[in-house]
Amino acid sequence: MKVTWFHLMPYRWLPADFPKRYHSVWVDVPNHLYDPERGHLLYNEYLDMLEYADQVGFDAVGVNEHHQNAYGLMPSPNLMAAALARRVSNAMILVLGDSIALYNPPTRVAEEFAMLDVMSGGRLMAGFPVGTSMDINYCYGQNPATVRDKYREAHDLIIKAWTTREPFAFNGKFTKLRYVNLWPRPIQQPHPPVWVPGLGSIETWDFCINHGYNYSYLSFSGYKRALNMMNGYWERRAALGAPANPYSAAFFQQVCLSDTDAACEREWWPHVDYFFNKCLHIYPGMAEAPGYRTEASLRAGVVAQVGNVSANMGMNKTWKELVEQRYIVAGSPQTVRQQLEELAKSLNVGHLGLGLHMGSASIDLVNRATQLFAEKVLPALRPIFHEWEDHWWPKALPADKRLAPGGANAAYERRRRTGDGAEVRS
Amino acid sequence: MNAPASRILALGAHRPSIEVLEAGSGPPLFFLHGAGGIPIWEGAMALLAGSHHVYAPLLPGFGQSTGLEFLDDQLDLFLHCFDVMEALGLDRPYVVGESMGGWIAAEMAALRPGQIGRLALAAPVGLWRDEAPVADMFGMMTHEMVPLLFHDLNCPAAQLMLSLRELLSNKDDRSQEQIEFLIGMARGARTAAKFLFPIPENGLERRLWRITAPALIIWGDDDRFVAPTYADIFGQHIRGARIQKIPDVGHLIAMEQPQAFADAVIRWGSAAR
């Protein structure tokens, strides 16, 4: 099993009466609530957390894209990944991802992901989400009735741009380009592994299975409530003749980790409360623009479509309820280890997206959890699914061929000290 | 005799198939519905059928009409409506549209002025002023829309819409019929979104001068969805347009005050220019 330390990057200082006074955490949450100086602190601390995860041995670090959202401060995940590419030396980098239908032209995604892949020495996992309706329709004005067609076209263009070695013309319905000619192109061949986050629609499963992409289920409601959906995914793979390779799937689980179960509740509850009751304060009238979901998905889940979006998202629940129903995996290293083993085996997922930062948690609390996880949980998870090959992992340059920040300067200094100036000028 | 006849008009391969509701006799009246479709015939539609032969085609996604995938953009939509008019054998008919349908009717009249006999637009969308933003029909819940759509929240139509709230939030015990109703609503909303999301404005204002048909602009003076100030902008740009503001009514004029709506439309239909 592989574990990606995944950050949402929430704003930590929403007011106490936020859910009462404000419409939503997303789309129309007024930005006078955001203090840029505190934001400076947050970005630096959040990157520190991700870098620390690399230092203690996590397999990958992960970021994603949201817009006009107080719990997701990464409108451009690629900027974050670029910062990480220089400072994270061993871990792979998961960008989950770029909502490819938002980029105009979508070759921008092909270019920036290629830049990240080259900068990082081939350590990129390239996420292609459709994006939530809040992000892509309400914030970015994409037409909900056509955005899925636009997504598929953008996908075809990006893959073709990555894999074609001569300039070509692309005459799409949404994008028309006379000359597509990618500079740079990615290190990984034929291209970085593609990960597609979804919420359980058959169309997305088929898209992933047919293209050989990783399917990531991003949920805030925990692994127990995901069982039916993941079973559906494995059944669909079987129906299409694809092996049940656990690494073809990823699952995002939020985890709170302390030295003991009792300490965990004491230390983490304020931040769990902050996340579930402020960060998930989402206005249902903008949960899904008309047409965002296909009619087939609508039919399969008519309940969720028109129902109250936050009913199942863990608002207004106690610590005990959230823990028992596994919205969060929380407790001592032993408790967390045991529950994550259960998660892996019950869902059959080989990739765990670990949400180890929660709501308003401080860097001290989070780094302690990161350290505990690396020392006492990670070693137990690693051997799970060792019999399977992971086709969805980056094929990075070997570590000794990857350059470290400042390496060239160090070489220059070395040569300067020894007086060999000729080499410097060349 | 209130119920209209319904038939399917197949426009041909790779083109939509359209359900047409039809009733009454007299001069032809081509009716273009709003984003809510035609939920009830009784009332305004039946009154119009008392003096006109009413043809009310449903756009793809509404009722039994299909083929939205063949209409890529707004021009496709306007031309499609001409196709329907032609398939029905209508020559320079009286075209009446409400809200989204009013916008389509205005665009058609600007695109092919010679093919529209008369025009009545009931609170059409299609224009935009920053100081009077049109309400976001795609970004709110049905029950929140009602106070913006009606002047009198106690009128039957408003109460009917408010009663949907329970159906929309009750999750477990829906009948198959209710599920189909909800899917139908979502399908219609998808069609509206395809042409109007996120802002229902695409340059109509600079085309309005092309309209030559005698045009009536009807507006509820308590329209909080599309402010009555837009009536004046339509009036300024369409030569010879008549503006009629109806007191004590909101955006859905035909639903809230069917008689006043029908009177205005029928009177305009029989007026000499």
Image (cartoon, rainbow, N blue to C red):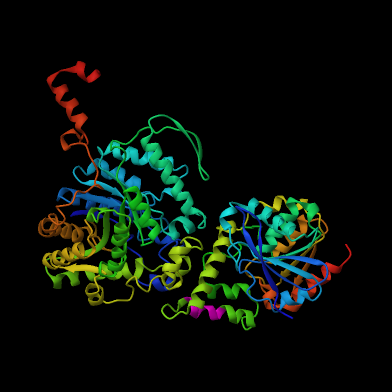
Q: Is residue B206 magenta?
A: no
* Residue lying farthest to the top in this orientation: A422
- Residue at (48, 53) in percent of width and height: A147
Q: Nearer the viewer, residue A366 or A307?
A: A307
Quarter of the picture containing the N terminus of chain B is: bottom right
- Residue B203 % position (x, y): 66, 51
Q: Nearer the viewer, residue B151 or A103?
A: A103
- Residue B25 % position (x, y): 81, 72
Q: Nearer the viewer, residue A378 or A147?
A: A147
Above or below, B213 relative to B122: above
Q: Is residue A295 left or right of residue B22?
A: left
Q: Quadrant of residue A38?
A: bottom left
Q: Nearer the viewer, residue A373 or B181?
A: B181
- Residue B6 % position (x, y): 67, 71
Q: How many marks?
A: 0
Q: Is residue A124 left or right of residue A178?
A: left
- Residue A49 % position (x, y): 22, 53
- Residue at (37, 50) in percent of width and height: A128
Quarter of the picture containing the C terminus of chain B is: bottom right
Above or below, A258 relative to B146: above
In this orientation, does residue B137 appear? no
Above or below, A312 relative to B60: below
- Over which residues does the magenta segment extend? B162-168
* Residue lying farthest to the right in this orientation: B272
Judged by its main secondary structure, the magenta piece is helix
Q: Is residue A186 left or right of residue A267?
A: right
In this orientation, does residue B36 appear? yes
Q: Is residue A127 left or right of residue A409?
A: right
- Residue at (12, 69) in percent of width and height: A260
